[in-house]
Image (cartoon, rainbow, N blue to C red):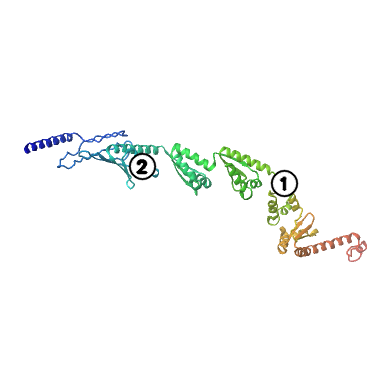
């Protein structure tokens, strides 16, 4: 019985060995991928099978990737498990290209989706930019097809990539970036382009596919300048100040209520509006209504009255503006000046009366103050001094207000009683010698005319000896 059993066992081993050799005589191939992007070449076996007792047999197959779509060659190392009940395992290493992050995606989303959809494991070596796909043969081949599709899509994207650079200025670039970078992030997420904004240089560089770059440029332009733009010539600094309002409050309220961006360049009187079509239209209508409600008036004065309008250091003009809320602008001409006033009808009328009082030399008295008028006569110019130097000196030394009306040859002094008295004394010291000399000359002229002058020559004296 034992001999028969031994023979039977030997026959089974021979049959098994013979069956294995039949398999060994066939060339080794790599399993076809479900939907390969490129064709694979069948590589013949390069090593013969070797039987080593009961140990597993191993096979190495080296394949070449078709370089028509991918420049770098992929090295595929397939390892099949032997023995009963073992699943075939393999791995593939492929170059991830110049930008390996295309396989990672935002927050790792791309590589996670690849692993979930193919069942293969994806490992990216960021030092060598090599992507390794491992797992069951069928999963690896599906993962390889997906990876090659991503590489092909990236190559197509780069072929269609363009760069757009614009220079808009620092303020516009800040608007493109938005608060905390919100605008630029939204634009990049919506279009998929890369945007580099340089505030200091005032430049913007957009890189990506042509269509997406164009869309991103439009979004950036709208963020910086608005969907629509318009302009309005205000015509004067007064109008500019009306639009600005106290502490720029009016222009801020206009922007907040309409959503339109309003800008007036330094030294300019042109208002620029930008925003959506509706916002620009609304803001334009509101600005026109504001200017119409603050038309005010113009008045012409002699150039000699400009100082009275301004007051010392501009104090009179500022006081009128602060107390009435109007805007006042003075423009000198060759002989006359134009005083332009902008404000509501009520405010403008109040300002008109205050300006006229200033021009007429009327000064409002403060608590405990008095006013005194002094006749200057022909000494008016001497009291004023060159360029008003004497008046400035008197006001500075005595702490009073001195207003000289040249056409009336009268000076009005306003201040505390003792200071007004001291100033009056100093002015009289200037005026008295001049007026006394003028009186003496007048008296001499009258004496000559009446024949009472001691120096008058008679006809008899003219005939006398010595003449």
Q: CA distance from mark 2 to mark 1?
A: 73 Å
Determine whether 437 is above or below 148 in the image. Answer: below
- Tell me the SS state at disc 2: helix
Q: In this rendering, would 424 be left or right of 448?
A: left
Residue 324 appears at what percent x and percent y? 70, 50
Q: Quadrant of residue 365?
A: bottom right
CB atoms at circles 2 and 1 under 8 Å apart? no
Dot 2 surroundings within 10 Å: few (below 14), some, or many (20 or more)?
A: some
Dot 1 surroundings within 10 Å: few (below 14), some, or many (20 or more)?
A: few
Q: In this rendering, would 463 be left or right of 364?
A: right
Residue 337 appears at what percent x and percent y? 71, 49
Q: Quadrant of residue 192?
A: top left
Read off the residue under disc 1: 346
Residue at the image position 85 percent from the left and 60 percent from the top = 442
Read off the residue under disc 2: 112
Q: Which residue extends farthest bottom?
A: 466
Indicate which label's residue lies in the foreground, 2 or 1: 2
- Tell me the SS state at disc 1: helix
Residue 305's mark?
none
In depth, the one of 405 and 352 nearer the eye is 352
Residue 180 appears at what percent x and percent y? 49, 48
From the image, which quarter does the C terminus lie in?
bottom right
Residue 183 appears at what percent x and percent y? 49, 44
Sequence order check, earlier mark of 2 and 1: 2
């Amino acid at each position: 019985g034992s001999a028969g059993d031994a023979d039977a066992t030997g026959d089974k081993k021979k049959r098994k060995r013979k069956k294995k050799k039949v398999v060994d005589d066939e060339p080794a191939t790599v399993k076809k991928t479900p939907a390969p992007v490129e064709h694979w070449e069948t590589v013949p076996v390069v090593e013969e099978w070797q039987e080593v007792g009961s140990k597993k047999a191993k096979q190495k197959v080296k394949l070449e990737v078709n370089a028509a779509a991918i420049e770098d060659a992929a090295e595929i190392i397939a390892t099949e498990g032997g023995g009963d009940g073992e699943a075939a395992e393999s791995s593939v290493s492929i170059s991830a290209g110049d930008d390996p992050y295309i396989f990672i995606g935002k927050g790792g989303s791309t590589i996670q989706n690849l692993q979930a959809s193919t069942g293969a494991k994806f490992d990216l070596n960021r030092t060598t930019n090599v992507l390794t796909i491992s797992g069951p043969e069928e999963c690896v081949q599906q993962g390889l097809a997906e990876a090659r599709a991503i590489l092909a899509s990236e190559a197509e994207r780069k072929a269609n990539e363009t760069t757009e650079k614009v220079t808009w200025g620092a303020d516009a670039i800040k608007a493109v970036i938005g608060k905390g970078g919100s605008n630029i992030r939204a634009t990049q997420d919506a279009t998929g382009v890369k945007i580099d904004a340089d505030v200091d240089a005032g430049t913007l560089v957009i890189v990506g596919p042509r269509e997406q770059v164009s869309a991103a440029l439009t979004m950036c332009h709208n963020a910086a300048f608005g969907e629509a733009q318009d302009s309005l010539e205000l015509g004067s600094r007064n109008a500019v100040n009306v639009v600005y309002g106290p502490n720029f409050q009016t222009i801020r309220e206009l922007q907040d209520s309409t959503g339109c961006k309003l800008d007036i360049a330094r030294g300019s009187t042109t208002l620029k509006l930008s925003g959506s079509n509706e916002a620009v239209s609304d803001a334009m209508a509101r600005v026109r209504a504001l200017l119409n409600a603050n038309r005010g008036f113009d008045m012409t004065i002699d150039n000699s009255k400009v100082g009275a309008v301004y007051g010392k250091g501009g104090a009179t003009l500022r006081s009128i503006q602060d107390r009435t809320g109007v805007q006042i602008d003075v423009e000198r001409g060759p002989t006359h000046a134009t005083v332009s006033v902008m404000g509501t009808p009520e405010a403008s009328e109040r300002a008109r009366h205050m300006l006229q009082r200033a021009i007429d030399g009327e000064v409002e008295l403060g608590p405990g103050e008095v006013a005194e008028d002094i006749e200057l006569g022909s000494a008016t110019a001497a009291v004023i001094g060159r360029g008003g130097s004497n008046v400035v000196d008197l006001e500075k030394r005595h702490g009073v207000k001195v207003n000289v009306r040249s056409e009336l040859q009268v000076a009005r002094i306003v201040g505390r009683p003792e200071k007004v008295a001291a100033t009056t004394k100093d002015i009289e010291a200037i005026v008295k010698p001049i007026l006394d000399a003028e009186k003496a000359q007048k008296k001499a002229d009258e004496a000559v005319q009446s024949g009472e002058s001691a120096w008058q020559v008679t006809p008899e004296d003219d005939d006398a000896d010595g003449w």
